[in-house]
Image (cartoon, rainbow, N blue to C red):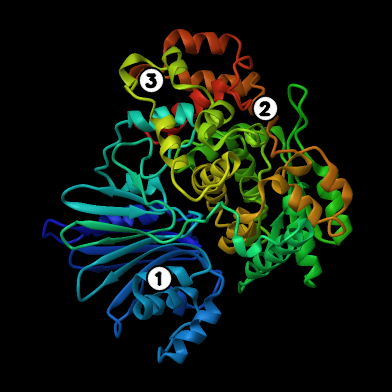
Amino acid sequence: MCGLAGELRFDGSGADVAAVERCCAKLARRGPDGSGIWTSGPLALGHRRLSIIDLSAAGSQPMVDSDLGLTIVFNGCIYNYQDLRDQLRSRGHRFFSTSDTEVILKAYAEWGLNCVERLFGMFAFAIAERDTGRLILARDRLGIKPLYLDQTPERLRFASTLPALLAAGGTDTSIDRVALTHYMTFHSIVPPPRTILNGVRKLAPATVRVVEPDGTATDHRYWEPSFTRDPERSGLDERDWQDALREGLRTAVKRRMVADVPVGVLLSGGIDSSVVVALLAESGQRGLATFSIGFEAAGGESGDEFAYSDLVAAHFGTTHHRIEIDSSRLLPGIDAAVAAMSEPMVSHDCVAFYLLSEDVSREVKVVQSGQGADEVLAGYDWYPPLADIPRADAVEAYAEVFFDRRFAALRELINPEWMIDEDAPLQFVTDRFSRAGAETAVDAALRNDTTVMLVDDPVKRVDNMTMAWGLEARVPFLDHEFVELAARIPTAQKLADGGKGVLKRACRGLVPDEVIDRTKGSFPVPAIRQLDGPYLARVTAALTDPAARSRALFRPDAVQRMLADPNATRTRLGSNALWQLALLEMWLQQLSIA
């Protein structure tokens, strides 16, 4: 897990090494253990290292293999790197390190672009071919590792975070009006390739991009799960599916223990993280470090779930860390979390993960998390209303239960000059749902949420907030083989028992019943959901700042109405709508975007 950056020139000039150095300086917190720059003519690659596998200098990056004529920068972890290294050795490759980085390099030399299909893990990487001048960019199947792009006719820059690209200079920071529409409608999600800024794009998950020396590029999408029933599994009953799911998750958790440093668990007290702890305990892990977080209550909402995390920690005998966030840390934590965001992320979970990661990073460098189970196994409350909807009516039904607001309602919030003519979010969902490979309305929604929403909301926020403290988060529920299995499970089994029924039933006897039968919780930060006092003042300052007035994204009457009653207006999914507006302005102002 690290941060990477680079520049490839198309105009005949040498790479701007100073620009790449500025990118890398901005990535320092993602990789506090080392740094490096490599340059050759029009290309420069930069890297910041977080040492997890092969802690020696041999694992440093950029990594050059002169015999192969290849250079790589890589962010992530390849869990099956040891098996791949054995395969590559049998094919005549010799290794100078014990790192997973070198395994990718040799795998590319052996299998070309198809090497990504053999990689089990999370990754974003850039490989430079010496002899052709070609640059290969790739991202993992579920988009766990990010890769942002800034391309002009003269050059391509890329980096692990958007702010790192801005640090290089020369980026077009004007607001993308289509992306703004997505942000305000599609639950604050901006699907790839767009970001909120016109000058920055992101490589889609499960994509390999081949960039030629003249700047032309070709994308290869190498993976997408099928959300249809598998004829070869037609004879499986409910117990069979539960057994298969439990075994698949067991494998996914075991894979994510590969490291040359200790691995802990973020334990919320919900079923997802509790199952991860249970499976690690089952495999013989002793002295496992677990971490939970809690905030002060506000507006009648509890700020912690310690009762459940304490129960799980005691049941499995973990070395538990109960982190209670004093209110004095929360307000500065908001601005710090916003500064760590690659894109505006509305969820108040961001602040929780940021502050949790700060404390956890003092104890361990790697943690497993239960993230992704709700999207993969239908744990959210917008899935049951789709159960009886005909497949042909799925788009409108999904928009009604998931969109924060419909396109027509945007005119009440956004100034006319920022409005677009067509309902881009609805068209995006229509295009996604129209593709083959999703059998029912619920299947179509799960496919969209697993491959789009999950990537550009929960996955992104956890990566950004943990890596802000040099903490690597691993997500077994997003093991691609586990996701493929879950996609095939009949939807009725996933929707059972209030959602994630197949998981709940599979885990009876593995985790305490109190955790399975509890009401679904969240990562609560009540002070953001119920804005008051200094938190309301911070929101007010952002929306009335001269930069916000000059930008004039939002209608003044709408802003004033919401500020007068800050907790009254909620999105369709219950989020604080005022926070959604303010968060965008806070992010733009943090990055000094005019």
* Residue 467 horizontal side relative to residue 107, left or right: right
Mark 1 lies on a secondary structure that is: loop
Task: Inspect the image, locate mark 1, and give the three-letter code of the amino acid beneath it.
Answer: Gln
Front residue of 274 and 332:
274
Name which quarter of the figure residue 82 lies in. Answer: bottom right
Identify residue for label 1.
61
Asked if the residue under mark 2 is in contact with the one under mark 3, i.e. CB atoms within 8 Å, the reply is: no
Name the residue located 46 percent from the left edge and 48 percent from the top edge.
436
Q: Residue furthest left?
A: 12
Q: Earlier in the sequence, mark 1 or mark 3?
A: 1
Give coordinates of residue 372: x percent, y percent: 62, 50
Nearer the observer, disc 1 or disc 3?
A: 3
The image quadrant where one finds the C terminus is top left
Q: Is residue 286 visible?
A: no
CA gap between label 3 and label 2 equals 25 Å
* Residue 307 horizontal side relative to residue 589, left or right: right
Identify residue for label 2.
527
Identify residue for label 3.
553
Mark 2 lies on a secondary structure that is: helix
Give coordinates of residue 582: x percent, y percent: 50, 24
Q: Is residue 437 visible?
A: yes
Name the residue located 23 percent from the left edge and 64 percent from the top edge.
43
Asked if the residue under mark 2 is in contact with the one under mark 1, i.e. CB atoms within 8 Å, the reply is: no
Task: Inspect the image, locate mark 3, and give the three-letter code of the amino acid beneath it.
Answer: Leu
Give coordinates of residue 537: x percent, y percent: 57, 19
CA gap between label 1 and label 2 equals 42 Å
Mark 3 lies on a secondary structure that is: loop
Task: Inspect the image, locate mark 2, and give the three-letter code of the amino acid beneath it.
Answer: Ala
